[in-house]
Amino acid sequence: MASEMKINHSEKAYELLRADAEKILKLIKVQMDNLTMPQCPLYEEVLDTQMFGLSREIEFAVRLGLINEKDGKSLLDSLERELSALHEASTRK
Amino acid sequence: MASEMKINHSEKAYELLRADAEKILKLIKVQMDNLTMPQCPLYEEVLDTQMFGLSREIEFAVRLGLINEKDGKSLLDSLERELSALHEASTRK
């Protein structure tokens, strides 16, 4: 029962973090499609703020022992890769 | 056993969040004593960034069901009160 509880919190943490990463990706897509150019400082600032927020959440989940550090790092890395692919695609338009 | 596990994660979350709030307070004290004036834009920026980071951690813990929303809000509020008392004291120097 105890480990089941732990798994549930852990699963929930992964789920929330993945959803938050997805949200950042969507936000940046919307920004790119509609609002501002990637060269715009506002875009950079929004992205930096969101990435910082997510990295703090991940760090917190690691400190709580709910996710492991490697998974947290790989979640951030893969988001960064997707964002830079998006960025590249948009500058080629 | 299951609820004991939950309590442990919950206690740990409160503990980490309180420690983080304390860290912000100390950082700002050091800044005030040694580095910059409260009127300095850098000071404002550091404080904003730290408060944003803490509020994201609190929000995340609430979403995980580890702390309740009211406690999270009161942690942030009390930190803000302490910071503004500090700020006031330093401008009277």
Image (cartoon, coloured by chain):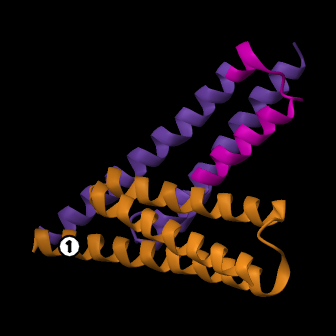
Chain colours: A orange, B purple
Task: Write down the quadrant of residue A49 in the picture.
Answer: bottom right
Q: In the visual, does B34 lie left or right of B23?
A: right
The residue labelled by disc 1 is A7
Q: Is residue A56 magenta?
A: no
Residue sitting at 47 percent across and 48 percent down?
B17
Q: Is residue B33 magenta?
A: yes
Report the residue at 65% width, 80% height from top. A89
- In the rendered view, does B61 fall on the left or right side of A47? left
Q: Which residues are magenta?
A: B31-53
Q: Position of residue B51 (x, y in %)?
A: 66, 48
Examine the rendering and report whether any part of residue B71 can be seen: no
The amino acid type of the residue labelled 1 equals: Ile
How many numbered circles are shown? 1
Residue plotted at (61% across, 59% down) = B73
**Helix, strand, or loop for circle 1?**
helix
Of residues A72 and B46, the one drawn nearer to the viewer in this rendering: A72
- Could you tell me what secondary structure mostly forms the magenta stretch? helix
Residue at the image point whose x is 47% and y is 60% from the top: A57
Q: Position of residue B18 (x, y in %)?
A: 48, 43
- Which of the image's four quarters has the C terminus of chain B? top right
